[in-house]
C-alpha cells in the first residue's frame, strides 16, 4: 500500500473490500465463466461508481485537498484491482497445483504506482511473470483486462518476465522511470520482491549520474515544447514549467540516486530541508486539487487550463471577486505563484543534489573556484556560481541584494540556488531607505539597460522576489494574468520578455525580422528612457482604470528615483501613456488618408519620440506571444513610421505626397512597358488615394489584372498572390462597381474559410471597382494551398452570380467558439467624423466569431452606404473592425438620425444578432 494512502480518512466509506469480496463469493462457482465475469463486473462497476461519487463529494466539500483526493482515486483503483485479481485467479481460473512458472504479480507503475490519480487518469499496470508466459497466465491477464475495459477504465498495461523487465528498463528511459515508481498491488509478493531487487541491482546501481542527466535533459526539452515559461496564461499543469511533472522529476531523481520511497525521505537524504518539504507538499497539494477539478469540469483527462474552464475551477475552489481582481484572476495568480515556487524548489533541490554528489567527488557542477573578494565586492564563487559568503551578508548591507544581480549580469555568472533562496528570505530588508539609495538605483538601472542579457538577470531578480520588492509597482503585477485570448503571458513575464527583445534588437540579433527597428536603435538618443518605458508600459494593469494614463503617473514618480533626468522622465511618461497609439493607428486606420498621418504626427511631435515609440510598439507586440507578430503588422508600422517621419521633417505639407505618387507612376510605367498614351489613360482612371495606398508590387499586379480583363472583355477578374512577407494572401477583385460588392466579397471569403485582415476598396473614374484584400487562414497564416485558393475564387464568383445562395449561406449558424465564449466583450460602436476629411470612420468592437465581418458589411449594405476601406484587427477574443464610409453620392454621413440608426444596427450585429435573412435577394 502506498504511503500516500495514510492521509485518506474513512477509507471504507470509499470502498469496503470485505463486503465486496463476500458479494463476489456469493456468485458461486456454477454456470458459465463469462456469465460470472459479467455479474462480477456489475458488482465492481457499482462499487467503482459509488467510490467515485464519495471522492467527488469530498472534493466539493474540501476543494483544496488535492493530495488526499488523488490518493483516494488510487486507493479505490487498488481495491478494485485486488478484488478482480482474486476473483479471476480464484473463481474463474483457479489452480490447485500451480507450477513455478504459473506465478503472477500485479504492480502499479507510473503515476498510479506513486499512489496519485486524477478522476480520468490512466490505470498503468504491469503483470510480472518469472519466465515465459503460460497459457494460464494469458487467460488471467486477458480476463482482467477485459473486465477493466468493461468498467470503463483506460488501461495502460504491459506483461513482462523478469528478464524482459530488466532488459527494457535498461534500454528505455520512459520505462525505467515508470518502473522506478512501481508498487506492489496484489499477487505473488515474492515474485514482485525479486523484480524489485533485480531492478535496483541491474538497472539502478551505479547509474545515478546518467539517470539524473537524462531526466534533466528530458525536463528541458519538455519545457521547450510547452513554451519554456511558467507564466503562460493557459498553462499545462502537468507538463508545463512549474507543473506537476517538475515535482515528479525531483522525486524520481531522489529515488533513483538514494532509493527514497517517499517525498519526506528526501529530507533524510539532505535533498530538501524541512521548510522546502512543506513547500513541496503545499505546491503538490494545490496542483493536484486543480488537476482533479479540471478533470471533473472537462469530464475527460484534460491537463491544460484553458480560458473556458478557468472561471468554473475558480468557482469550485471558492475564489471570489475582490476589488480590482476577479475570482478567476485571483485563482490564476495563485497558480502562477505556486508554479514559481516549484521553480524555486527545483533550483534548491539541484543545489542540494550537487552538494551531495560533490561530497562523493561526483559533482554535476564545476570545480570549486574562489575569486578575490575585491573583484566581487565580497561575494564569492561556489563551483562557478555567484554566492553570498555568509548567512548575514545581505543584512550587513541590504543594497547587496541588488548588487548580487548586477554582478551576475556584469560577469555573466549564474547565481547559486542557495544564495537565491537567501535573497528571497531577506527581501524584507529592502525598505524605503534602500529604494531611495542612489547606489541601489544605479545598480538596478545598469541591469535594466545592460547590453548583455538583461532579460535573464531580471527574471532571476523577479523569481527571488527582489524585483517586486525594490519596485513595488512591479510587484503588484507579478503573476497577474491578463484574462484574454490575446496575451500569452502574465504581465511581469510579458514586460521582461519585451526588455529581452529590445536587447536583441539593439545587439543586431533580429536585423532580418526588424530591419527598421534595428536601424533606428543606432540613432536613438534617449536609450535609458526607452528601456525604462518598456519596463513600465504595462505597470498599472489591474488598477481599474486606463493603465496607460495610470502608468504615466507611476513613471513620473519612479523615474527620478532611478536617476533619470527631468527630460528623460517626461519622455518615459509620454511613451507609457501613448504606447498603444502607434499600433492602434497602424492597424485600425487608413494610412492612405493624409489626415490619419497628420493627427498621429500632431500627438508624437518629435522624430526622437517617433523612433522610440516604434521600437516600443514592436517589442510590446512581439512579447505578447508566439504567432502574434507577422509581416503585415511590420509593413503597416513601417508605413506609418515613414509617413509620420516625413511630416515631422517637412511640416504639415503634402509636397512629399505628390512626389511619391509621381515616382510610383514613373516606375510602374517602366515596369509595364506600355505606350505613353496607354499608360496615361490608365493613370487617369484612379484618384490620388489609390496611388498612395498601394505598394509598387501591388500596383504592378493590379495593372496587369485590369489590362487582362479589359483585353478579354471580362466583367469580373480575380487574382490571388501568396505573400509570405506580409504573412497573408492578396486577393484582388476587378469588377463593375455596385452596392453591396464588399459585403458579397467578405461573405464569400468567410464561407471559403478565409479571414480578411485589411481591405483597400478603390473605384475607378469609369465605374469599375478594384479591391485589394489581404486574407489569412484561421491560424493566422497565408492561404497558400492551391485547392483552397481555387475554392476561394469559386466562392467569390458564385457570390457575384448567385446572390440569393450567398445570403443563405451567410445566415447559417456559425460554429461555436467555446474558448472565446468564456469572455464577455461588450459591443461598442464608435463613429468619428473628425478622423478623416473625406470619410465617416466607424469602429466596431465585438467578440470575434465566424461571419462577423460578413454580418457587419451586410448591415452597412442595408444602410445604403459605400465602404471605401476596411481595417480588421483581432486581439484574441476581441475583434476591432474599422470602416471608412460615405453615402451613395460620396459625401460624409452627417445626419444625426442616420448615424444613430447605423449605430443601432451595427450594435445589434456586434452583440450577436445576424441581420442577414434566411432568404435575401
Image (cartoon, rainbow, N blue to C red):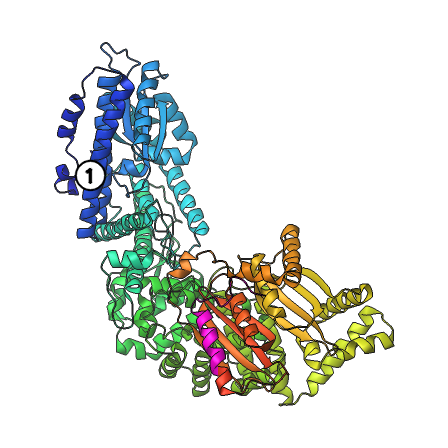
Residue 510 in view (yes/no): no
Write the residue at 35% across / 27% down: 202
Q: For mark 1, what is the residue?
A: 50
| 893 relative to 428, above or below | below
Q: Is residue 592 left or right of residue 658?
A: left
Q: Position of residue 524 (x, y in %)?
A: 55, 78
Place residue 792 in its image quadrant.
bottom right
Write the residue at 22% across / 41% down: 52
Q: Is residue 171 left or right of residue 120?
A: right
| 592 relative to 24, above or below | below
Q: Position of residue 921 (x, y in %)?
A: 59, 66
Q: Camera-side residue: 139 or 855?
A: 855
Asked if residue 905 lies in the magenta stretch, the reply is yes
Q: Camera-side residue: 683 or 278?
A: 683
- In the rendered image, the quadrant that contains the N terminus is top left
Q: Is residue 716 left or right of residue 171?
A: right
Residue 6 in view (yes/no): yes
Q: Camera-side residue: 885 or 367?
A: 885
Q: Position of residue 878 (x, y in %)?
A: 45, 67
Callout 1: SS: helix
| 351 relative to 265, above or below | below
Near mark 1 (Cα within 10 A), the count class, few <14, some 14-19 or many ≥20, is some
Q: Position of residue 366 (x, y in %)?
A: 40, 49
Q: Residue furthest top?
A: 97
Q: Is residue 175 left or right of residue 69?
A: right
Q: Which residues lie in the magenta part? A: 900-921
Write the residue at 82% across / 77% down: 681
Write the residue at 54% across / 80% down: 841
Asked if residue 349 lies in the magenta stretch, the reply is no
Amino acid at each position: 500500500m502506498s504511503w500516500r494512502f495514510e492521509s485518506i480518512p474513512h477509507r471504507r466509506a470509499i470502498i469496503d473490500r470485505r463486503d465486496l469480496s463476500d458479494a463476489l463469493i456469493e456468485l458461486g462457482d456454477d454456470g458459465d465463466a463469462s456469465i460470472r465475469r459479467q455479474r462480477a463486473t456489475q458488482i465492481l462497476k457499482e462499487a467503482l461508481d459509488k467510490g467515485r461519487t464519495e471522492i467527488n463529494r469530498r472534493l466539493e466539500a474540501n476543494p483544496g485537498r488535492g493530495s488526499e483526493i488523488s490518493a483516494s482515486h488510487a486507493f479505490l483503483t487498488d481495491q478494485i484491482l485486488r478484488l478482480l485479481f482474486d476473483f479471476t485467479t480464484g473463481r474463474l481460473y483457479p489452480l490447485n497445483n500451480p507450477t513455478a512458472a504459473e506465478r503472477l504479480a500485479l504492480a502499479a507503475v507510473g503515476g498510479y504506482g506513486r499512489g496519485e490519480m486524477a478522476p480520468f487518469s490512466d490505470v498503468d499496470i504491469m503483470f510480472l511473470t518469472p519466465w515465459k508466459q503460460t497459457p494460464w497466465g494469458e487467460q488471467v491477464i486477458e480476463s482482467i483486462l477485459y473486465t477493466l475495459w468493461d468498467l470503463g477504465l483506460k488501461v495502460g498495461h504491459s506483461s513482462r518476465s523478469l528478464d524482459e523487465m530488466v532488459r527494457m528498463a535498461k534500454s528505455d528511459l520512459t520505462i525505467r522511470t515508470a518502473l522506478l515508481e512501481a508498487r506492489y498491488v496484489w499477487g505473488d509478493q515474492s515474485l514482485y520482491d525479486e523484480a524489485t531487487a533485480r531492478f535496483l541491482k541491474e538497472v539502478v546501481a551505479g547509474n545515478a549520474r546518467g539517470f539524473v542527466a537524462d531526466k534533466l535533459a528530458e525536463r528541458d526539452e519538455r519545457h521547450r515544447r510547452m513554451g519554456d515559461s511558467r507564466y503562460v496564461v493557459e498553462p499545462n499543469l502537468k507538463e508545463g514549467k512549474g507543473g506537476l511533472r517538475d515535482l515528479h522529476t525531483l522525486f524520481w531523481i531522489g529515488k533513483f540516486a538514494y532509493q527514497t520511497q517517499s517525498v519526506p525521505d528526501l529530507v533524510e537524504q539532505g535533498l530538501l530541508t524541512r521548510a522546502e518539504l512543506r513547500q513541496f507538499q503545499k505546491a503538490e497539494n494545490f496542483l493536484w486539487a486543480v488537476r482533479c477539478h479540471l478533470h471533473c469540469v472537462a469530464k475527460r483527462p484534460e491537463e491544460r487550463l484553458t480560458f473556458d474552464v478557468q472561471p468554473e475551477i475558480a468557482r469550485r475552489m471558492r475564489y471570489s471577486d475582490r476589488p480590482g481582481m476577479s475570482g478567476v484572476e485571483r485563482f490564476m495568480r495563485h497558480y502562477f505563484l505556486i508554479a514559481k515556487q516549484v521553480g524555486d524548489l527545483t533550483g534548491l533541490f539541484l543545489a542540494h543534489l550537487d552538494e551531495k554528489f560533490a561530497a562523493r567527488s561526483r559533482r554535476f557542477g564545476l570545480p570549486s573556484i574562489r575569486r578575490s573578494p575585491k573583484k566581487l565586492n565580497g561575494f564569492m564563487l561556489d563551483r562557478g556560481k555567484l554566492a553570498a559568503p555568509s548567512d548575514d551578508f545581505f543584512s550587513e548591507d541590504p543594497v547587496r541584494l541588488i548588487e548580487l544581480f548586477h554582478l551576475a549580469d556584469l560577469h555573466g555568472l549564474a547565481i547559486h540556488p542557495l544564495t537565491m533562496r537567501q535573497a528571497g528570505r531577506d527581501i524584507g530588508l529592502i525598505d524605503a531607505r534602500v529604494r531611495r539609495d542612489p547606489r541601489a538605483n544605479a545598480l538596478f538601472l545598469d541591469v535594466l539597460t545592460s547590453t548583455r542579457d538583461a532579460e535573464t538577470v531580471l527574471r532571476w531578480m523577479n523569481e527571488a522576489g527582489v524585483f517586486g520588492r525594490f519596485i513595488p509597482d512591479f510587484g503588484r503585477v507579478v503573476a497577474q494574468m491578463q484574462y484574454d485570448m490575446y496575451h500569452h503571458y502574465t504581465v511581469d513575464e510579458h514586460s521582461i520578455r519585451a526588455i529581452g527583445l529590445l536587447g536583441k534588437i539593439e545587439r543586431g540579433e533580429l536585423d532580418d525580422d526588424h530591419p527598421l527597428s534595428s536601424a533606428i536603435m543606432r540613432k536613438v538618443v534617449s536609450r535609458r528612457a526607452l528601456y525604462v518605458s518598456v519596463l513600465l508600459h504595462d505597470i498599472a494593469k489591474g488598477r481599474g482604470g486606463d493603465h496607460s494614463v495610470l502608468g504615466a503617473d507611476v513613471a513620473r514618480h519612479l523615474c527620478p528615483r532611478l536617476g533619470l533626468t527631468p527630460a528623460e522622465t517626461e519622455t518615459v511618461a509620454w511613451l507609457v501613456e501613448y504606447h498603444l497609439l502607434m499600433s492602434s493607428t497602424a492597424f485600425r486606420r487608413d494610412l492612405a488618408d493624409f489626415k490619419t498621418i497628420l493627427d498621429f504626427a500632431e500627438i508624437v511631435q518629435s522624430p526622437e519620440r517617433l523612433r522610440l515609440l516604434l521600437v516600443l510598439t514592436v517589442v510590446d507586440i512581439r512579447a505578447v506571444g508566439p504567432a502574434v507578430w507577422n509581416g503585415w503588422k511590420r509593413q503597416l508600422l513601417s508605413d506609418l513610421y515613414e509617413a509620420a517621419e516625413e511630416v515631422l521633417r517637412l511640416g504639415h505639407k503634402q509636397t512629399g505626397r505628390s512626389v511619391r505618387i509621381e515616382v510610383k507612376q514613373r516606375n510602374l510605367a517602366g515596369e509595364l512597358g506600355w505606350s505613353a498614351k496607354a499608360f496615361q489613360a490608365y493613370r487617369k482612371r484612379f484618384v490620388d488615394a489609390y496611388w498612395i495606398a498601394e505598394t509598387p508590387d501591388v500596383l504592378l499586379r493590379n495593372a496587369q489584372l485590369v489590362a487582362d480583363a479589359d483585353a478579354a472583355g471580362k466583367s469580373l477578374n480575380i487574382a490571388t498572390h501568396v505573400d509570405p512577407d506580409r504573412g497573408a494572401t492578396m486577393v484582388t477583385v476587378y469588377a463593375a462597381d455596385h452596392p453591396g460588392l464588399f459585403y458579397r466579397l467578405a461573405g464569400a471569403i468567410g464561407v471559403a474559410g478565409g479571414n480578411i485582415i485589411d481591405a483597400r476598396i478603390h473605384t475607378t473614374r469609369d465605374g469599375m471597382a478594384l479591391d485589394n484584400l489581404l486574407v489569412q487562414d484561421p491560424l493566422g497564416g497565408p492561404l497558400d494551398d492551391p485547392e483552397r485558393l481555387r475554392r476561394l475564387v469559386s466562392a467569390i464568383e458564385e457570390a457575384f452570380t448567385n446572390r440569393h445562395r450567398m445570403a443563405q449561406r451567410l445566415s447559417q449558424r456559425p460554429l461555436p467558439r467555446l474558448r472565446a465564449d468564456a469572455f464577455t466583450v461588450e459591443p461598442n460602436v464608435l463613429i468619428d467624423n473628425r478622423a478623416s476629411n473625406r470619410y465617416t470612420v466607424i469602429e466596431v468592437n465585438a467578440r470575434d466569431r465566424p461571419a462577423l465581418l460578413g454580418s457587419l458589411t451586410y448591415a452597412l449594405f442595408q444602410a445604403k452606404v459605400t465602404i471605401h476601406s476596411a481595417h480588421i484587427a483581432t486581439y484574441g477574443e476581441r475583434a476591432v473592425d474599422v470602416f471608412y464610409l460615405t453615402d451613395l453620392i460620396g459625401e460624409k454621413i452627417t445626419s444625426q438620425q442616420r448615424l444613430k440608426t447605423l449605430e443601432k444596427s451595427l450594435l445589434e450585429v456586434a452583440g450577436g444578432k445576424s441581420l442577414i435573412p434566411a432568404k435575401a435577394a
